[in-house]
Image (cartoon, rainbow, N blue to C red):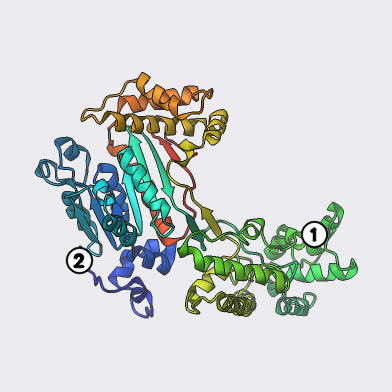
Amino acid sequence: MAATNDSQTIEEATTGMESAPDQKTRRYDRQLRLWAKSGQAALESTHILVLSSSSTSTSVLKNLVLPGIGQFTILDRTITSPSDAGNNFFLEGQDSVGKPRAEEAVRLLLELNDGVKGHSIVNKDVKEVLGTEDGVEWLKGTFSLVIAHNLEKGALDQLSDVLWKDAKSPPLVVIRSAGFLAEVFIQFHEHAVIDSHLDTTPSLRIDKPFPALLKHSLEIDFENMDVTDHGHVPYVYILVRVLEEWKQAHGGNPPKTSDEKKEFKAIISKMRKKADEENFEEAEAQAFKCWSSTVVPYDIKSLFGAENVAPHTKPFHLLLKALEVYTTTVEPYTLPLSATLPDMKASTGQYVEIQRLYKDRAVEERDTFKAILDKIIAEQGEDASLIDDEVIDDFVKNSHILRLLKGKKWGALDQDKEKLAEAAASEESSKQLGIHLALSALSSLQAKRQEAEFAPTLEELTAEAKAILPEGVELPDEHFDNAIGEAARSPTADLPNTAAFLGGVVAQETIKMITKQYVPIDGYCTIDLVETWSGVL
């Protein structure tokens, strides 16, 4: 693979591209379409700590190195065994046996992408790191995210406690697997997502048209228009025009009853000059937008007033406060207009014109929003440069799909007896709980045994699982029996099939956390590859 200029950022590589895109842009072209320049820049600036060089851990790292994370460090003092060499693609068979597993894995992972830096620490383990104040500060201050696969229960609990005590700590991704069973959990305090990429279209404000849109819609001379042009008028203009005339004839009210709605659609149909005018078909199909009031969605309104629990989400909360003020003080008391328009039947000239109308209005409303934000930032004594214009633009553009996730500490479910009882009684979550209990029992028993050759019996694992549940709550029969059977059959097996699957799942969720785009899993993602099944508890 040819070398690239590592000092060149993705912004530099994709700015002012009048000539053909450079090698770096071509390499990352497909993923740039998923998370854009901002997401790629976030990836390139991240440093991930991985607390294992197992087959699963290296599969995860493979799927992070390829898209170009900045750095990764593997903390693992394990010496490569013959069994490691047989199931880990990032070891060189017998040539790696007897050598530090982390060093071997880092060397081979770096062959995938010469723009990524990798490090290995093979002279200590995570318990030693957590045993000193300097080690704790190094862990909390150096890394963007920590990934732990099948970490010993005592060390995992200690790590979780340390990271949870400080809201500035990086998120912790916990992976547990045994044979064909696995679960993934992300510990974080608070996670804000501006661009969630949810399939929800922003409002076109047909029921509350802005002045320029209303004026243009009313000025269209449908009667004397050429037949070709008539068949290419965007449906937005048609609906705004018909709705305005309807309101004038009905005391300012939109259609309300079923009969009125049918009458409204009939008016649109009668405006056709030809039976096959697709723009009028679109107008009839989208007529519901005329009587569906444009309001602030409940999902967004519920975010107003949310408590800020993590320093890194402070800008998001300031933006939310500005949005709350905007939607309650600026007419028409809804979210700022988005310049994004759906596809519609229209001539090129007509589509460009309606795009211009929406874009101009969106810029006006963005400027109004920014003025409100600037005032809030000043009132709270924050730095005026805390939020840059690009973030403000993204926030306004995606204000209809914002998300704010409140995370939980690893292990909180096992301490919440009421939640466990609810999950055990629910048919919808019994399978997820069965897998979680099987893996929890396995981890707990292994911590107690501390055996080199760990081979628990079904009876021992079942007793350990029952101890997790509150008294009087029964184990979820069939699902638990299947899960505990697999856990007993392969308690320490890191199978290539499971590792490959987890490599994709965990890397995907990690990228969501790093780029702050898309919505990550919220809870325990449980996986059963015997039945090719997954679910969230």
Asked if the residue under mark 2 is in contact with the one under mark 1, i.e. CB atoms within 8 Å, the reply is no
The residue under the point 43% across, 63% down is 35
Numbered circles on residues, count: 2
Q: Which of marks 1 and 2 is nearer the N terminus?
A: 2
Q: What element carries label 2?
A: loop
Q: Is residue 15 left or right of residue 342?
A: left
Q: Mark 2 points at which residue?
A: 2
Judged left or right of residue 346, residue 477 is: left
Q: Position of residue 30 (x, y in %)?
A: 38, 61
Quadrant for the N terminus in the image: bottom left
Which residue position is annotated with label 1? Answer: 265
Q: Nearer the viewer, residue 5 or 133?
A: 133
| Badge 1 amino acid | Lys
Return the mark for residue 469: none
Q: Where is residue 471 in the image (x, y as percent from the top left)?
A: 51, 24
Q: Nearer the viewer, mark 1 or mark 2?
A: 2
Crowd tier of the residue under label 2, counting other residues whose Cα lies within 10 Å: few below 14, some 14–19, many 20 or above: few
Give whichever of 74, 360 is nearer the camera: 74
391 and 362: which is toward the camera: 391
Residue depicted at x 20% and y 57%:
111
Q: Residue at x 14, y 42 (%)?
A: 93
Q: Report crowding for label 1: few under 14, some 14 to 19, many 20 or more residues within 10 A (C-alpha).
A: many
Q: How far apart are marks 1 and 2 (CA)?
A: 61 Å
Quarter of the view holding residue 421: top right
Q: In which quarter of the image is residue 486?
A: top left
| Amino acid type indicated by mark 2 | Ala
